[in-house]
Image (spheres, rainbow, N blue to C red):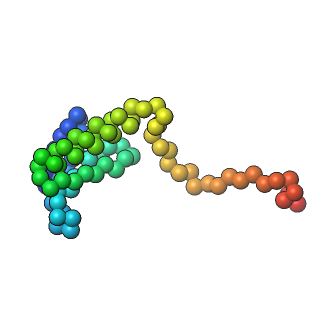
């Protein structure tokens, strides 16, 4: 397994026989899943740096706070006519 680093992020790279290209996944980006792919080392490096830059840009925007986990509850308000 090959690794790459960029701007403090590390990615693990494997070759996918199914996809017939190199596939990478960023290691430990928090709750996010970040993947990329490329046919050559140059394409792979460009794709990795691009997704890292995009990830950092999105995280810095105040209107995109980290998502909260689902609480598994459903709240509904019924009209007065439905109360017995």
Q: Residue at x 34, y 50 (%)?
A: 33
x, y percent for residue 78? 78, 54
Q: Quadrant of residue 66?
A: top left
Q: Quadrant of residue 28?
A: top left
Q: Residue at x 50, y 44 (%)?
A: 68
In the image, 30 versus 65, the foreground residue is 65
Which residue extends farthest bottom? 18
- Eyeballing the image, is 8 above or below 83? above
In the image, 27 versus 63, the foreground residue is 63
Q: Is residue 64 left or right of residue 37?
A: right
Q: Residue at x 53, y 51 (%)?
A: 70
Q: How many numbered markers are drawn?
A: 0
Q: Is residue 53 left or right of residue 21?
A: right
Q: Is residue 20 visible?
A: yes
- Eyeballing the image, is 47 above or below 6? below
x, y percent for residue 74? 64, 55
Q: Quadrant of the C terminus?
A: bottom right
In the image, 34 versus 42, the foreground residue is 42
Q: Residue at x 68, y 52 (%)?
A: 75
x, y percent for residue 51? 28, 43
Q: Quadrant of the N terminus?
A: bottom left
Q: Is residue 3 visible?
A: no
x, y percent for residue 4? 16, 44
């Amino acid at each position: 397994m090959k690794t790459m680093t960029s701007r403090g992020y590390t990615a693990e790279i494997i070759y996918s026989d199914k996809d017939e290209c190199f596939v990478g996944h960023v290691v430990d980006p928090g709750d996010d899943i970040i993947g990329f792919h490329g046919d050559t080392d140059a394409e792979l490096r460009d794709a990795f740096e691009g997704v890292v830059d995009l990830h950092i840009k999105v995280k810095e925007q105040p209107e995109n706070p980290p998502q909260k986990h689902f609480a598994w509850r459903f709240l509904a308000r019924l009209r007065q006519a439905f109360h017995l």
